[in-house]
Image (cartoon, rainbow, N blue to C red):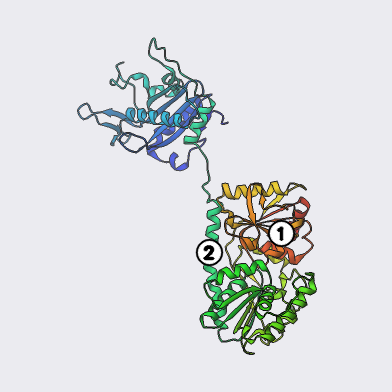
Amino acid sequence: MHKPGMFPQTILRKILEDPRRQAEIIVYNQLRDQLEDFTVFYHCPWYDENAARGSRDGEADFVVAHPRWGFVVLEVKGGVISRDENTRIWRSRNKQGKVFEIKNPVEQALVSKHVILRKLQDAWRGKAPFIRAKHGVIFPESGQPRNSNDLGADMPLEIFAFAEDMDNLGAKVVKILVTEPEQSETRYGNLGEKGIEILHQLFNRGFELDLSLAALLADDENKILQLTQQQNTYLDLTKTQRRAIFTGGAGTGKTTLAIEKSKRLAQEGARVLLLCFNNALSEYLRTQVKDLCNITAFSFHQFCLSMIARARISFDYKEDKDRRYFDEKLPEALLAALSADDNLRYDSIVVDEGQDFLESWWELLLLTLKDVDGTFFVFKDDNQRIYRKTSQKLPGFETDPLHLSVNFRNTQSIFHATEKYYKGGDIRPGGPEGKEIQWYPIKPGREAKMIEKAINRLINIEGIPEQDIAVLCACALEKSALAPGDSIGRYGTAPSENFSGESIRFDSIHRFKGLESKVVILTDMDGAVASNELMYVGLSRARLLLLVVASEVTIGKLKNEIYGKN
């Protein structure tokens, strides 16, 4: 609650130096020095959108308020004041003898009083009391009339203060406020601290009109989309090449380029096979190329199963799904399928997530080409080998890899967090600066509540759509503190491969590799800090905003690694 006093507490220099405002400065100083237990607002502009004759604006020079006695609106006019009896025009003559036409100060104060009273009542929660509201006029450089007559029917002398009143202006203003007609029985309610606070909100409210988080992220997203268009230059430079390997860190556009290269090849009439390692990423790839019938998008193991089915070869689908099943049995069956039907081969192959493919698979994929010289493009990031250490040599590729050196996808804030875990060729940030990482320390067992609270703020306060948020755990889904279930509190979730665009994605970092989201919340982090590859992948999944929910110890370790401090 604000204490009584002058608001603003100091006057801007440009007002102090303005000769047209000197009368107001005189009154300001006198009220400041003479009034106690009153709240005085100086320079109170208003806009009245409910006026019967249409919208209008105005300004009260001073509003003097008391929690018990109500408020009085004061209009101040400097110079020697006069009014022409024939035209009723008001004028002011300054010390240099120059005469100016001025507005009717009594009418100004009266109108301001009614507008301010109505705004105060409108802002009152519940029924407002019957508040005493008065108006007055101060002429600090004009003498009081030589007779005691009122200045007009609507201008009793008791509402005016003149030069002679300046030494006791505080008492005069209080008298204007509290004086009532003789035998008046009007009962007023208290303005109270509540009314004083409303006046503060009307005339002295401080605020910062920052953009909403949703608007800031949308601006960053537009900048990233514009920068992303520059990536296609890499494909232009390799248009005539039949083999190419692109390497680059997270956010350098490997998946985007893989999709674009596939589309270009398909538009030239080639039958294209677009592969990756993750099933969730393969679902995304399919949505991006669904309009081109001559592109087939699969994860490697999905592709093996599809070819086995198309070739109609014998295969035991019921055997244990161990590593040997995925690393050897399915590829062996793929080779059998290719041997059984030459029509299963493709003109061109494009591979994303190449760092996760075994060396033996490359030799098999070369056999998948119709022509030994068919087009074969690979995009990979050896920093993202979170499944196992695979060979970095690709048989059949004699040219040196082309290095993607600019991160377009992430904001610089996220990029600088991930670069601590990156090993490879030079890479630099190209995206917007972005928001800093948000850290949420929690105690064991409080993860779900904290994440629901963070999601609630993002959606209902910051305006972030649910589909732009992904919650990723650094462990297997079934071991997450958020499992089991298909919701986080009252917010529905879906895994990446079943994502419909109408809920929050909840998945593991492993399964989300190759994918991205505008906003990512990382959780179950305590066991992940020891793995540079897992930390690198997890941190880099956020395109625009990253939130980390973890214990204070884990957050301290991460901050120390990322920023060099706890």
At x 28%, y 21%, the residue is: 152
Q: Quadrant of the C terminus?
A: bottom right
Residue extending furthest toward the top: 183
Q: Secondary structure at mark 1?
A: helix
* Mark 1 vs mark 2: in front: 2
Q: State the residue position of label 2.
A: 223
Q: Against 417, is 396 above or below? A: below
On the image, numbered disc 1 is attached to which residue?
A: 563
State the residue at coordinates (43%, 40%). Answer: 15
Against 489, is 221 above or below? below
Residue type, label 1 = Tyr
Secondary structure under the numbered disc 2 in the rendered image: helix
Displayed quadrant of residue 411: bottom right
Q: Does any portion of residue 425 appear in the rendered image?
A: no
Number of other residues with Cα within 10 Å of mark 1, as a class: few under 14, some 14 to 19, many 20 or more: few
Q: Mark 2 is on which residue type?
A: Lys
- Seen from the viewer's position, the closer of residues 473 and 486 is 486
Residue 93 circle label? none
89 to the left or right of 116: left
Q: Earlier in the sequence, mark 1 or mark 2?
A: 2
Q: In the image, is residue 38 above or below residue 370?
A: above
Q: Quadrant of the N terminus?
A: top right
Q: Position of residue 449 (x, y in %)?
A: 69, 46
Q: Residue at x 65, y 85 (%)?
A: 341
Classify 10 Å Cα crowding around label 2: few (below 14), some (14-19), many (20 and above).
some
Residue furthest left as drawn: 86
Q: Quadrant of residue 321?
A: bottom right
> Could you tell me residue 530's position as x and y percent?
79, 62
Disc 1/disc 2 C-alpha distance (Å): 26 Å
> Can see residue 369?
yes
Residue 204 picture location, percent across and down:
49, 36
In percent of width and height, residue 245 lies at 65, 80
